[in-house]
Image: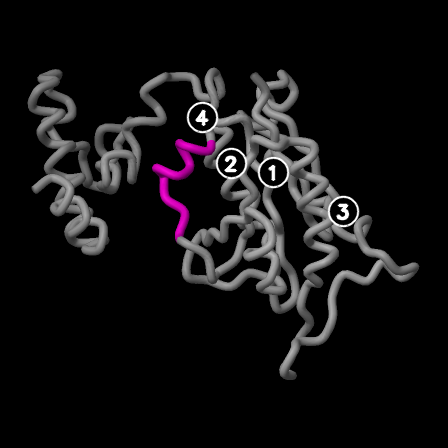
Amino acid sequence: MTFAATILTLYPEMFPGPLGISLAGRALEEGTWSCEPVQIRDFAADKHRTVDDTPAGGGAGMVLKVDVLARAVDHALELHPDCPVLAMTPRGKPVTQARIRELAAGPGVTILCGRFEGFDERIFAGRPVEEVSVGDIVLSGGEPAALMLLDACIRLLPGVMGAPSSGTEESFEEGLLEYPHYTRPVEWEGRTIPEVLRSGDHAKIEAWRKRHAEDDTRLRRPDLWERHRGVRD
């Protein structure tokens, strides 16, 4: 089954972008996933293809019009009724690896990319649109965030990554940051690969990796560590 990625955007030329190369690009060529950028302006009703207007109540910037957005979303839902519609916005719920796995296991995703000051709030009441965020940052638009989300999904599709375990022994998969990695040369500028990783003792190596994953999470991401402890307890 092909994972269908539909992107509602004012800049369709940004897709597939970097997703057209490397593993994602090969998977696109092989039909593992499809990329369909849709121009939001095509759903404007006037001859100027107007997609935005001034904020109600005043203020800087422009806001994407709800009637135009609704027609674009309706079009995407007609194409792929079973695909969830996600709007990329810093006001959304932070996306997690667990949510990425849910999306990757499904038929695909429709992503609504914002620009300017964002979306008319009524689109979220009038259509089944899930607000998601890729972090506590503000971008020029939703397109870079959409590329990030799609990359996270595509790499989990069957056959995209070489080793089946590549997607499971990573940061966030077990609620922890990933353990440190090393490779040859054994010594570099007086720094050596930890001896345990060269021992061939798989039980000791697994214990070392688990301990360092826990230590790094506790020190670098206390928020993750607290959640991990809560789930574990």
Q: Where is residue 200 in the image (x, y as percent from the top left)?
A: 13, 16
The mark that comes first in sequence, 4 or 1, is 1
State the residue position of label 2: 151
Callout 4 touching callout 2 (CB < 8 Å): no
Label 4 neighbour load within 10 Å: few <14, some 14-19, many 20+: some
User: In which image quadrant can residue 210 be found?
Assistant: top left
State the residue position of label 4: 105
The vertical placement of 166 against 59, above or below, is above
Report the magenta residues as a range: 94-103
Amino acid of disc 3:
Gln
Q: Quadrant of the C terminus?
A: top left
Amino acid of disc 2:
Asp
Residue at 61%, 28% in the rendered image? 4
Is-magenta flag for residue 97?
Answer: yes
What is the magenta segment's predominant secondary structure? Answer: helix
State the residue position of label 1: 18
The mark that comes first in sequence, 2 or 1, is 1
State the residue position of label 3: 39
Is-magenta flag for residue 60?
Answer: no
Residue at 59%, 54% in the rendered image? 142
Mark 3 or 1: in front is: 3
Direction front: furthest residue: 126
Cα separation, mark 4 vs mark 2, equals 14 Å
The mark that comes first in sequence, 3 or 1, is 1
SS at badge 3: strand
- 213 left or right of 156 in image: left
